[in-house]
Image (spheres, helix red, strand yellow):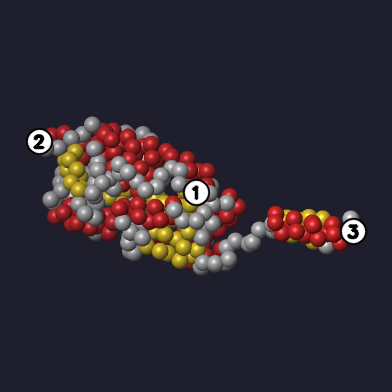
């Protein structure tokens, strides 16, 4: 057999097996193409202007800067984030389609009888972006200036105390339901279609209280139109440093915060996930991103993929119990 014949056979085998033949070397594995090589789509499951959209549009430019390719926000609203989540769950696992996964997706796991995706299994976690805490606020015309007053009012009132929410199954609603479970108080949920009409009726005295997101409630608290009683996070909010946590007031381990994270379709290569995680964490460390998030009452918070997965599974379990106890249903 001649040297030329041997080389030709090796070249043919290399072409079939995807291995490049390099002069002076029998076989060499072809190096994988660099990633990313084109713009990345960041799907948001809610309309433009909402909290999830704002967080996405703050992080996207800096994330793109770190990756060397534009990150383009794509709003796919519907079914409390489920429409966007399903699109990403079915997208190619190549790192070019990402999703802003939120606390709402972990609630949806129990709130909906059937989903077109599995929040626990259909995504590769990349990392946390930010958290937003809720705050228990009341109409200032009520004789309630502390949590003790709130409890007392609920106990002595014939019909208990009412709490508004932005809709059945929202984190605002379930924050109230969790407190109801922990306190044993007679609390009546009054759902609205969105936070704005709920706050309007709270300001007007049609409802007594609300476990609202801080960004929504803060302007009214500062104006004296609402009274802040307690925050639902484990630590006090820097935006309301004088308002105690529910944990401080006799409800240990009470920690409810809205949160936002970045995920990719299941099966996305680990090397791509790690590159995205590093880029995300560098973006979150930048002063301008932190400032813009904090201006929108969001606390920047980074994580590893493993920490995000642990949070996701824990939240799914927590909200399953609260949804079952409250009887909450998707609107």
Callout 3–callout 1 Cβ contact below 8 Å: no
The mark found on residue 138 in the picture is none
Residue at label 1? Answer: 266
- Mark-to-mark CA distance, 2 and 1: 52 Å
As drawn, 324 above or below 87:
above
Q: Residues within 10 Å of mark 3 (few under 14, many from 20)?
A: few
| Relative image position of residue 20 (x, y in whole percent) | 74, 59
- Mark-to-mark CA distance, 3 and 1: 49 Å
Residue at label 2? Answer: 158
User: Of residues 291 and 33, which is closer to you in this image?
Assistant: 33
Callout 1: SS? loop
Find the residue positioned furthest to the top: 184
Residue at label 3? Answer: 2
Question: Of circles 3 and 1, which is in front?
Answer: 3
| Relative image position of residue 70 (x, y in whole percent) | 51, 68
| Residue at the spot 89% in from the left edge and 59% down from the top edge | 3
Mark 2 or 1 closer to N-term?
2
């Amino acid at each position: 057999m001649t040297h030329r014949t041997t080389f030709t056979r090796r070249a043919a085998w290399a072409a079939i097996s995807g291995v490049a033949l390099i002069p002076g070397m029998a076989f060499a594995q072809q190096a994988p193409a660099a990633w990313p090589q084109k713009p990345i789509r960041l799907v948001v499951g809610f309309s433009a202007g909402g909290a999830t959209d704002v967080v996405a549009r703050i992080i996207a430019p800096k994330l793109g800067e770190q990756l060397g390719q534009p990150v383009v926000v794509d709003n796919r609203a519907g079914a409390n984030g489920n429409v966007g989540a399903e699109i990403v769950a079915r997208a190619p696992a190549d790192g070019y389609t990402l999703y802003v996964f939120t606390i709402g997706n972990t609630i949806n796991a129990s709130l909906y009888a059937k989903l077109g995706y599995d929040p626990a299994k259909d995504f590769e976690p990349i990392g946390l972006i930010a958290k937003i805490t809720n705050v228990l606020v009341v109409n200032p015309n009520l004789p309630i200036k502390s949590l003790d007053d709130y409890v007392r009012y609920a106990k002595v009132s014939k019909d208990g105390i009412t709490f508004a929410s932005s809709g059945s199954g929202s984190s605002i609603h379930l924050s109230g339901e969790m407190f109801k479970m922990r306190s044993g108080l007679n609390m009546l949920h009054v759902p609205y279609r969105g936070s704005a009409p709920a706050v309007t009726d709270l300001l007007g005295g049609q409802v007594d209280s609300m476990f609202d997101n801080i960004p929504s409630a803060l302007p009214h608290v500062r104006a004296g139109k609402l009274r802040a009683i307690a925050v639902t996070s484990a630590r006090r909010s820097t935006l309301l440093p004088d308002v105690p946590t529910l944990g401080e007031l006799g409800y240990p381990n009470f920690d409810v915060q809205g949160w936002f994270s970045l995920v990719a379709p299941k099966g996305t290569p680990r090397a791509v996930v790690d590159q995205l995680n590093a880029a995300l964490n560098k973006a979150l460390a930048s002063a301008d991103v932190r400032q813009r998030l904090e201006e929108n009452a969001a606390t920047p918070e980074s994580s590893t993929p493993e920490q995000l997965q642990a949070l996701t599974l824990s939240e799914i379990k927590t909200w399953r119990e609260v949804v079952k106890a409250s009887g909450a249903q998707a609107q």
